[in-house]
Amino acid sequence: MELAQQVPQAGFQSRPEEGVFVLPGGYVDAAGGVHREVELRPLTGCEEEYLASLAEETSSGKAITQLLARCLRRVGGVTAVDASITRGMLVGDREYLMVKLRQMTSGDKMRAILRCPSEACGKNMEVPLSLAELPVEERPVKAGAFTVELSGLGPVEFRLPTGGDQEALAPVADEPGSVGELLRRCVLRMPDSATLADAGPLVEERIEQLAPRMELEIEAVCPECGNAFSAPLDLAGFVLSELMSNLGNLRREVHFLAWHYHWPEGEILAMTRRKRRQYIELVEDELERMNPS
């Protein structure tokens, strides 16, 4: 599987070692200012515990909004980052940040579980992925609204989809009319003589052209039946599910460190996963040294 990566161009430069990244699109604030450089911190046990506490019916869009609000130190010059800001971010930018958050928390390597689409097979398989090689379609925005000319009718003003749209449309995301509902939310103004049926296809096309994207189509061959197929991967949703599945490990790690170091729970939860596991390895090495087999 070959994946091409597009790197942010002049003006900004990502510094992963500092948690500084450049959004593929950009966040547009209420005054029209565009912010592309962000500072992200890795997940701690506090965020892992928060994710595990979410109700089962919580949508991935809402969970991503809250998680990014907790982990973003700044968006451009905005340091008071809250859910209203992360909710207003472009979908592609949110996906990008979720991937970066996962890299900072657990590294580049991960495995996707795919199901063979053949009705005669249907077996599950693991496909290794390198997050460092994922393609990023960088499409910097210059404003929060765009205009397209509807032939014979006049201009249509629209915006790009955001996390707020993901949250609002979660109950109907899998229904046939979900695209129409999204377009209804994104169209800001159109001629009185025009309808959404008139403007929708053109606006949808322009959104596809303008919105930053971080999509992945996995090419795989089923090891059981040899069926070759491709499958889209919802990167943000996949990363979120992986992070939410760690509660059992988190509790064991907190117990292990509290037992051996006598640290309070709050201090252990404030650590990143990587730091917790570094201390666990130290204890395990010491136990092995003291009790050789």
Image (cartoon, rainbow, N blue to C red):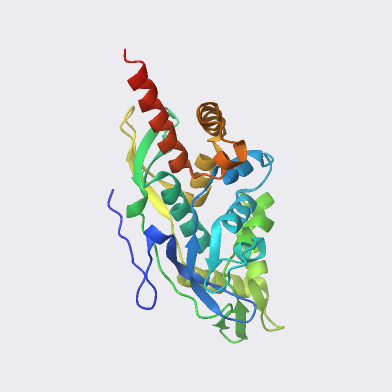
Q: Looking at the picture, how far across and down is residue 178, in whole percent?
A: 63, 57
Looking at the picture, how far across and down is residue 196, in whole percent? 66, 72
- Asked whether 248 or 267 is in front, the reply is 267
Q: Is residue 266 visible?
A: yes
Q: Is residue 168 left or right of residue 200?
A: right
Q: Residue furthest right?
A: 192
Q: Foreground: 195 or 15?
A: 15
**Residue for point 59% across, 79% down:** 145
Image quarter of the C terminus: top left
Q: Residue at x 42, y 44 (%)?
A: 106
Q: Furthest-top residue in view?
A: 293
Horizontal relation, residue 190 to residue 38: left or right: right
Q: Quadrant of residue 292?
A: top left
Is 74 left, or right, of 1 in this rendering?
right
Point out residue 184 in the picture as x, y percentages from the top left corner: 67, 68
| Residue 255 location (% of width, % of height) | 56, 28
Is residue 124 visible in the rendered structure shown here? Answer: no
For residue 15, what is the image quadrant?
Answer: bottom left
Residue found at the far left of this picture: 2
